[in-house]
Image: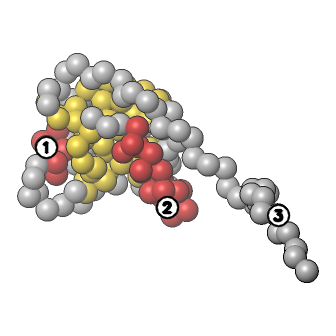
Amino acid sequence: DTSTVNFSPAAPSPRSPPPPPPPPTMAKALGANNDWVYYNDQMKEVSSGNGCSALASSMPDDACGFVLFRINENAHTILQWKGPNVSAIKKVKANGNLQSAIDGLPIAKGVIEVLGKKNLTSETIYDRWAPGSGSKVIQDD
């Protein structure tokens, strides 16, 4: 008595979450130091500009997102924004999307977590980005 077992791939569960969106294939060109591009937590471009004042005003307090920030002609970093009025669940989801930001912005070297706008300055970004800086977090005191 021989029986045949048919192995077919299982259909996706209707409860499975949708896969994350593919990361952007190319980061927008940033031509000057302190240029930036702000992406929402789904890696859709929202705004761009120059300088930390303009950046701070473009990041909503009730959202998470990612910023490609040009430090100098040879260095870019990712700022992971977590607004002060964001729920814990949204922050966890944003952490899950961090790899998409890293993959989609391959010119960036390193990630700095930003939890507040008060101390968001070029100097603070440079300090946190520098090798051996210890902290990779910018937060309000």
- Residue farthest toward the front in the current orientation of the protein: 1
Mark on residue 126? 1
Q: Residue at x 13, y 43 (%)?
A: 126
- Residue farthest toward the bottom in the current orientation of the protein: 1
Q: CA distance from mark 1 to mark 2?
A: 26 Å
Instruction: Describe residue 81's horizontal placement relative to residue 11 as left or right.
Output: left
Instruction: Residue 78: give x, y in percent of width and height.
Output: 30, 43
Instruction: Residue 129: give x, y in percent of width and height.
Output: 16, 48
Residue type of the residue flagged with mark 3: Asn
- Residue farthest toward the left in the current orientation of the protein: 132
Give the mark count.
Answer: 3
Mark on residue 6? 3
Tag 3 or tag 2, which sits nearer the N-term? 3
Q: Nearer the viewer, residue 77 or 117?
A: 77
The residue that disc 2 covers is 92
* SS type, badge 2: helix
Tag 1 or tag 3, which sits nearer the N-term? 3
* SS type, badge 1: helix
Q: CA distance from mark 2 to mark 3?
A: 40 Å
Residue type of the residue flagged with mark 2: Val
Task: Report whether residue 102 is seen.
Answer: yes
Instruction: Pick the quarter of the image with the C terminus.
Output: bottom left
The mark lying in front, picked from 3 and 1, is 3
Instruction: Residue 95: give x, y in percent of width and height.
Output: 44, 57
Instruction: Residue 28: give x, y in percent of width and height.
Output: 36, 24
Q: CA distance from mark 3 to mark 1?
A: 59 Å
Instruction: Describe residue 102's horizontal placement relative to residue 46 as left or right.
Output: left
Q: Are marks 2 and 3 in contact (CB under 8 Å)?
A: no
